[in-house]
Image (cartoon, grey):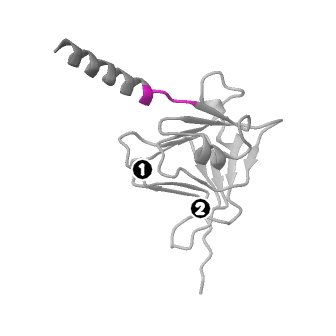
Amino acid sequence: MARIKMTTICLALFVFVSTGTAWVWQVPEVSRSIQYVIDSLASDGDTIAVWGEGSPPFVYYECIDYRGKALYIANACYLPNPPAPPNPDDVVIDAQMQDIAVRINGIAKLWACVLQGISARNGYNTYDYGGSIEALPLRQVLNSARVRFYFTPVQE
């Protein structure tokens, strides 16, 4: 009986430890692409800290999709030991009218996704609403984010 209890306790401890690790991924240190970090490195609960080299603003010409992962993507100035005072204009995701700039869809987790202190602009959407940020369901959080250029071309 003692052997069964010990095995159960060890198994529970292993599961807790293996799922409790969250990483902070620095962009552009680990990659120059936010989407690459999402696709290849980040897991549920991780943080992606975005900044740049030189002086702000730091513009990332890409579209990002959380891909169903529960992630905290933030301007590095909103995290501990910030490189500068917080300003959403310092980090910009520019979709260049290619697609929706930031897509936060399909999250089936109990915790929320966060986009903090990052501006999104020049998103494109073929539907009748804007293309900068798409966040469905409404469990996701946009915190200190700035959305610009509410333009959706009409196809006739």
Residue most toward the top? 2
> 30 above or below 5?
below
Instruction: Work out which quarter of the rendered image holds the N terminus and state it.
Output: top left
Q: Estimate the x, y position of residue 76 in percent, counting from the top left.
A: 65, 32
Q: Which residue position is annotated with label 2? A: 100
- Indicate which disc residue 52 carries: none
Q: Which residues make up the magenta segment? A: 18-23
- Front residue of 86/107: it is 107
Counting residues from the N terminus, which is met first, the one under dot 2 or under dot 1? 2
Residue at left offset 37%, top offset 49%: 108
In the image, residue 101 sits, relative to residue 43, either above or below, namely below
Under mark 1, the amino acid is: Ile
**Residue 38 horizontal side relative to residue 110, left or right:** right
Q: Position of residue 120 (x, y in %)?
A: 63, 52
Quarter of the image where the C terminus is located: bottom right
Where is residue 17 drawn, in percent x and y? 42, 23
In the image, 86 versus 96, the foreground residue is 96
Q: What residue do we see at 62% from left, 64% from top?
A: 99
Magenta-colored segment: predominant secondary structure: loop
Q: Which residue is mark 1?
A: 107
Q: Is residue 62 magenta?
A: no
Q: Nearer the viewer, residue 148 or 96?
A: 96
